């Protein structure tokens, strides 16, 4: 008899906050500078240096807390977390331990079309470590402290996740919120977003948690999902043999596709946390919280729900259009300029994204304004240009930022809807292609497309396609009689 | 004026002389440098003498005085000595430890920067107990500092070098740091004035962290006017130190002038029974009692008070202090600056050997204790308990200042200067040397030690005045009145020895 087994997963997600200076020092946080150029006495842990808290980092953490329904602590405390490592210059990391800045929140993830709520235990502020650089064939390593002291938030979830897919969805949702709030770029390749996963398995229906295994430092959605899948399988196999997984910390080895032991419970670190005496308790008053609350944008799940309801988009399109805050804003603005939600959605998700991707331009720097895109769709909807011409116009809008109307006018692309002019062209084509006409009339109706092509050539694609079709059909069939 | 006469002047007198053109800052500096050179071998009070830096600063000072006269900054041309616990841009800063030998900081401690910007001439860096851990100045990688009153005796610690500089006339003013009594106790042992300001009054930026919640920069001087002068220069809020307070700095010098010879009518002086205990040297008790009688004679009302949790202070101090020290000293890993072992295999090996070679025994002892009391499983039993007890001590003082008295008077130390090596074998005996001073640090208050007499061995005795937060001015005004009436002026005796 095989009992059903479920996984219990909690994530600790670290996100780099996009403040210009470090969380306790004045050095810049720009990425890609030569090693150890972004330093100052504190970053180098020079004797006598002292930390001074970056106000913006606090504001960002509170913003995230409010966006995830957390309670904001009126007083929170910074603690020292001790461990010796060359890239941790002070010998301790300043973090929050007993009294974090945000507590008890939640967020919604979508999994197979269903919304699920995942609890957030806490969000706390801390500083990042530096980086050790190991050289091949050299008997030493170098330390780069440019990243040391950069502001991080750690978002700790409740053990509410049940599968690698849910964990992936949760992490994507966090990334989306961070980007909506504009407090982190959430860039996993550059390490701005990374996570540790806690996972255990148990018989379904069991309420007690099993011994948890922590998988450290997962820096891509894919790694999170594959590491968890591997670990769940490993632990399930143990459980089926009647064994328990040991409480330990493991690392994901991407090359081998497996997790391996980093340290066991017996070798657990003793961080010797205690309140940092160089920093006073962080006091956040109501006024400040309300000021920050007032700057909160509409959050991704709310925008998604609104798009479904207000614009009657399908779930896939709504998902695509709410991935990034700027896209959603762009879409909202375009629709408010011309009320064709579906048409505009299609133009954004196909043509606009196509060109942006091709030119690697971000939506924030899109050369086509939402109003101009709306105007273009409006030109199609009111039969001024055809959808085909519109693509040409759009390409020019993208390269020149001109309005669609000015392009249509200057290049004479206006659709011809005058039946007499179209009829004249039809008569011309029929007269100069007698063979094809007789073939058509003898039943080879597939040739209809040939006539359309000829006509489009003559009218330079400007003929109203519907009108052209109707008139052509009549002309070809009339003569048959 | 000859060199001997120059170094006997107070800073206030030096200022007058410089402005009157009686001597130049260069002459003044040379006189002090000469005094350091001729005494340092015996007393070992300086680790670094910065002759060139000092003479350059003195030269600039002379130009500024020539240009601006009365409008030149208050300390222009005045020599000062700096405890080697404070970082000085371009000047080696060692904390009297092998660990930092050769370390030249790229920036100035805020207090030092303030002195420099007011024209002061930095003579050099004074000896101390390694990383300020000690009460005798015997725990220095550069050897002990000797007491000018008796070379066989300790100077007190940890700011012994600074205290001796001022006592010997090597400098009229010196900066020290006080974590558990490290300014007041050596001031008492060498017969001069020492002030530990309220926590947060002087920025700790650039003060090498020992026990962050207890450390405070303060000053030594031979006269109360001088003490006010230097305190006015270094006090005030600093954006670079989150724990420095945004409290206005009174005009200490003017306040002293205004209160001169006003008596102490209306002042309530608390006399805590827990500070007058049997273990104290009898002559110390007697001299302090005599001091109290003078306070009463001057119009002050003596109030018997109780600070019932005083007995907790030493044990609490010796938990919190090493806990913070173990954390603060974690940065000395041999990676970025300072000492690194010559031979090592692994990374862990490098850490171990570097720290083993770099730190002296007292520093290691405190790192071990601190690591222990912060470790999981012991944190609650030791560190957390100590913090709770600390709150009781704070509340004792709060209640006393709220209900009973304006200031508190006690002995500064239970004994006068003891003999070198006398207490070295017993750390616990040594720790008791801070018994009357460390409660002030735990409570974040200000305390001033002034000489109030001599014992039978002709060694100075210190009287401690304790004030509520930011009451430095009151302490100095009381000390001024008290000094005037004391049976003998120790500062004159010191000067006769130079």
Image (cartoon, coloured by chain):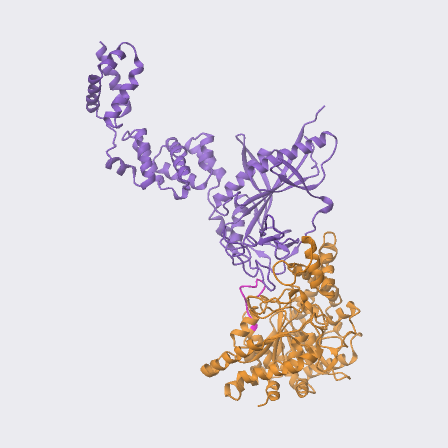
Chain colours: A purple, B orange
Q: Please check the rendered image and state whether residue A209 is part of the magenta-colored stretch, yes or no.
A: no
Our reading of the magenta stretch's main secondary structure is: loop
- Residue B289's quadrant in the figure? bottom right
Q: Nearer the viewer, residue A24 or A74?
A: A24
Q: Is residue A227 above or below residue B212?
A: above
Where is residue A29? Give x, y as percent: 51, 53
Where is residue A382? Give x, y as percent: 29, 30
Q: Is residue B475 above or below residue B389?
A: below
Q: How many marks?
A: 0
Lateral position of residue A145 relative to residue A330, left or right: right
Asked if one can make out residue B264 in the rendered structure from this viewpoint, the answer is no
- Residue B234's quadrant in the figure? bottom right
Residue at (32% x, 29% y) in the render: A387
Residue at (62% x, 88% y) in the render: B4
Q: Nearer the viewer, residue B369 or B355?
A: B355
Q: Quadrant of the C terminus of chain B?
A: bottom right
Q: Nearer the viewer, residue B208 or A63?
A: B208
Q: Is residue A31 above or below residue B280?
A: above
Where is residue B68? Give x, y as percent: 45, 81
Lateral position of residue A373 relative to residue B373, left or right: left
Asked if one can make out residue A317 in the rendered structure from this viewpoint, the answer is yes
Where is residue A51? Give x, y as percent: 57, 59
Furthest residue in direction front, as rendered? A137
Q: Quadrant of the N terminus of chain B?
A: bottom right
The magenta stretch spans which residues?
B234-244
Q: Please check the rendered image and state whether residue B235 is part of the magenta-colored stretch, yes or no.
A: yes
Residue at (33% x, 40% y) in the render: A399
Furthest residue in direction bottom, as rendered? B1
Lateral position of residue B104 relative to residue A344, left or right: right
């Amino acid at each position: 008899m095989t009992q059903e087994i479920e996984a219990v997963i909690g994530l600790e997600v670290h996100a780099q906050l996009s403040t210009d200076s470090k969380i306790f020092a004045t050095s810049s946080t720009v990425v890609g500078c030569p090693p150890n150029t972004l330093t100052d006495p504190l970053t180098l842990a020079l004797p006598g240096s002292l930390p001074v808290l970056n106000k913006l980092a606090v504001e960002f953490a509170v913003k995230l807390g409010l966006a995830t329904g957390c309670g904001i602590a009126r007083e929170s405390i910074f603690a020292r977390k001790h461990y010796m490592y060359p890239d941790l210059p002070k010998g301790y990391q300043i973090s929050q331990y007993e009294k974090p800045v945000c507590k008890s929140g939640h967020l919604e993830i979508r999994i197979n079309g269903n919304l699920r709520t995942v609890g957030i235990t806490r969000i706390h502020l801390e500083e990042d470590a530096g980086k050790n650089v190991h050289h091949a064939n050299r008997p030493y390593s170098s330390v780069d402290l440019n990243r040391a002291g950069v502001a991080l938030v750690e978002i700790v979830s409740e053990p509410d996740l049940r599968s690698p897919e849910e964990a992936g969805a949760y992490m994507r949702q966090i990334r989306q919120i961070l980007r909506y709030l504009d407090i982190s770029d959430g860039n996993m390749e550059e390490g701005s977003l990374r996570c540790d996963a806690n996972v255990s398995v148990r018989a379904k229906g069991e309420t007690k948690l099993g011994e948890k295994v922590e998988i450290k430092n997962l820096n891509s959605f894919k790694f999170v999902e594959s590491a968890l899948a591997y670990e769940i399988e490993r632990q399930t196999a143990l459980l089926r043999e009647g064994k328990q997984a040991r409480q330990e910390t493991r690392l994901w080895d991407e090359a081998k596709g497996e997790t391996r032991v980093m340290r066991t419970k017996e070798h657990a670190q003793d961080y010797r946390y205690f309140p940092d005496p160089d920093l006073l308790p962080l006091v956040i008053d109501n006024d400040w919280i309300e000021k920050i609350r007032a700057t909160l944008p509409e959050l991704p799940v709310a925008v998604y729900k609104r798009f479904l309801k207000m614009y009657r988009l399908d779930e896939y399109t709504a998902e695509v259009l709410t991935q990034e805050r700027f896209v959603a804003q762009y879409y909202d603005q375009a629709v408010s300029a011309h009320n064709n939600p579906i048409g505009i959605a299609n133009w954004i998700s196909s043509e606009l994204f196509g060109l942006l991707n091709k030119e690697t331009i971000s939506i924030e720097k899109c050369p086509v304004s939402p109003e101009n895109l709306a105007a273009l769709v409006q030109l199609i909807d009111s039969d001024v240009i055809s959808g085909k011409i519109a693509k040409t116009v759009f390409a020019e809008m993208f390269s020149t930022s001109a309005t669609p109307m000015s392009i249509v006018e200057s290049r004479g692309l206006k659709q011809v809807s005058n039946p007499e002019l179209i009829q004249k062209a039809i008569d011309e084509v029929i007269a100069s292609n007698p063979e094809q006409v007789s073939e058509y009339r003898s039943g080879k109706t597939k040739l209809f497309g040939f006539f359309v092509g000829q006509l489009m050539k003559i009218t330079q694609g400007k003929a109203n396609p519907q009108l052209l079709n109707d008139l052509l059909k009549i002309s070809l069939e009339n003569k048959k009689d | 004026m000859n060199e001997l006469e120059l170094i006997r002047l107070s800073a206030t007198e030096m200022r007058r002389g410089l402005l009157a053109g009686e001597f130049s800052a260069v002459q003044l500096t040379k006189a002090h440098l000469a005094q350091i050179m001729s005494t340092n071998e015996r007393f070992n009070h300086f680790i670094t003498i910065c002759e060139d830096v000092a003479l350059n600063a003195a030269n600039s000072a002379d130009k500024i005085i020539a240009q601006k006269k009365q409008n030149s900054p208050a300390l222009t041309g005045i020599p000062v000595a700096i405890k080697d616990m404070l970082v000085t841009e371009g000047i080696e800063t060692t904390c009297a430890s092998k660990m930092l030998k050769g370390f030249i900081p790229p920036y100035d401690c805020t207090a030092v920067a303030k002195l420099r910007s007011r024209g002061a001439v930095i003579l050099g860096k004074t000896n101390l107990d390694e990383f300020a851990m000690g009460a005798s100045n015997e725990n220095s990688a550069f050897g002990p500092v000797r007491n000018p009153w008796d070379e066989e005796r300790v100077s007190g610690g940890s700011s012994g070098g600074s205290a001796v500089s001022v006592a010997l006339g090597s400098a009229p003013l010196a900066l020290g740091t006080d974590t558990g009594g490290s300014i007041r106790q050596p001031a008492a042992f060498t017969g001069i004035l020492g002030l530990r300001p309220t926590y947060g009054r002087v920025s700790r930026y650039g003060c090498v962290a020992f026990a962050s919640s207890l450390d405070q920069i303060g000053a030594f001087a031979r006269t109360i006017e001088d003490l006010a002068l230097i305190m006015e220069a270094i006090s005030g809020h600093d954006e670079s130190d989150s724990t420095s307070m945004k409290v206005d700095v009174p005009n200490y010098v003017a306040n002293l002038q205004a209160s001169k010879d006003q008596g102490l009518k209306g002042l309530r002086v608390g006399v805590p029974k827990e500070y007058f205990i049997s273990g104290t040297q009898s002559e110390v008790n007697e001299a302090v009692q005599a001091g109290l009688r003078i306070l009463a004679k001057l119009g002050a009302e003596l109030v018997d008070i109780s600070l019932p949790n005083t007995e907790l202070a030493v044990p609490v101090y010796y938990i919190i202090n090493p806990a913070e020290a173990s954390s603060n000293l974690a940065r000395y890993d041999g990676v970025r600056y300072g000492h690194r072992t010559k031979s090592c295999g692994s990374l862990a090996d490098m850490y171990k050997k570097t720290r083993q070679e770099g730190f002296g025994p007292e520093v290691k002892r405190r790192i071990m204790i601190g690591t222990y009391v912060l470790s999981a499983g012991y944190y609650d039993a030791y560190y957390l308990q100590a913090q709770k007890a600390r709150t009781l001590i704070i509340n004792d003082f709060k209640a006393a200042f709220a209900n009973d008295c304006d200031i508190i008077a006690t002995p500064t130390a239970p004994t006068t200067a003891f003999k070198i090596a006398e207490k070295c074998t017993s750390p616990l005996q040594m720790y008791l040397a801070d018994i009357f001073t460390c409660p002030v640090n735990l409570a974040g208050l200000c305390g001033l030690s002034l000489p109030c007499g001599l014992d039978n061995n002709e060694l100075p005795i210190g009287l401690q005045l304790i004030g509520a937060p930011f009451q430095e001015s009151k302490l100095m005004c009381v000390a001024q009145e008290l000094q005037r009436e004391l049976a003998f002026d120790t500062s004159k005796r010191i000067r006769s020895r130079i």
